[in-house]
Image (cartoon, rainbow, N blue to C red):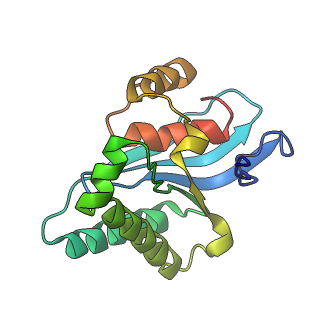
Amino acid sequence: MPKPKRHPWFDKTNHPVLILEDIMTIDPGLGGTGWAYWDELSRPNKAIAPDKAGVIPPQHGDVYQRIYRIALLVSEEVKRRGVDRLVIEAQELWTSDETSMAATSSGRLFNLVMLVGGIITESLRCKRLNSTNICLVRPTTWKGQLSKRAIDNRIKRAIGKKYPDHIADAVGIGLDIQDKL
């Protein structure tokens, strides 16, 4: 199976020099949605830490209410920060992975897919973004098979900071865009 084509923001071969302004990366999750924001993110310079990062905590209510609230809170951050580009970790089904199969059979994977769709929809409604300014990135594209601990160690090595769960993946996506993960 051919390797999937990378989005130009992540393509270091054809786009070795890149400067993006007002970019936010998102690690969606119903247990906490991490985000990281950069005024400016570039390569091939040294790694740049996010200007601001946070987590949207789990919400109360049934799953649809939770998805909607998280999507609204993300779109409020998009507006507040003046985000021009949004990168969201997409969900990926690994048919040979027991955790992924359990998530699929329990409906968790579909809930995450709905959350990503809700984040995109609400972010488009805030009129700052259009569909060309939103990029979905698969976990295997930005981190491959690296463990959570390995991601944390690479972030610490690149920018000298440690981030809590959910935020770390959002920061990791931004560092991958910079080719510093």
Nearer to the camera, 27 or 39: 27
Classify 131 as above or below 154: below
Asked if residue 30 lies left or right of residue 42, the reply is left
Give the x, y percent position of residue 124: 52, 77
Asked whether residue 174 is in view, the answer is no
Give the x, y percent position of residue 35: 42, 50
Residue under the image location 56 percent in, 47 percent down:
38
Number of residue marks: 0
Give the x, y percent position of residue 164: 32, 34
Classify 74 as above or below 50: below
- In the picture, the quarter occupied by the C terminus is top right
Residue under the image location 75 percent in, 47 percent down:
19
Classify 103 as above or below 176: below
Asked if residue 139 lies left or right of residue 162, the reply is right
Give the x, y percent position of residue 121: 47, 77
Nearer to the camera, 45 or 3: 3
Residue under the image location 23 percent in, 53 percent down:
57
Asked whether residue 17 is in view, the answer is yes
Farthest left residue? 61
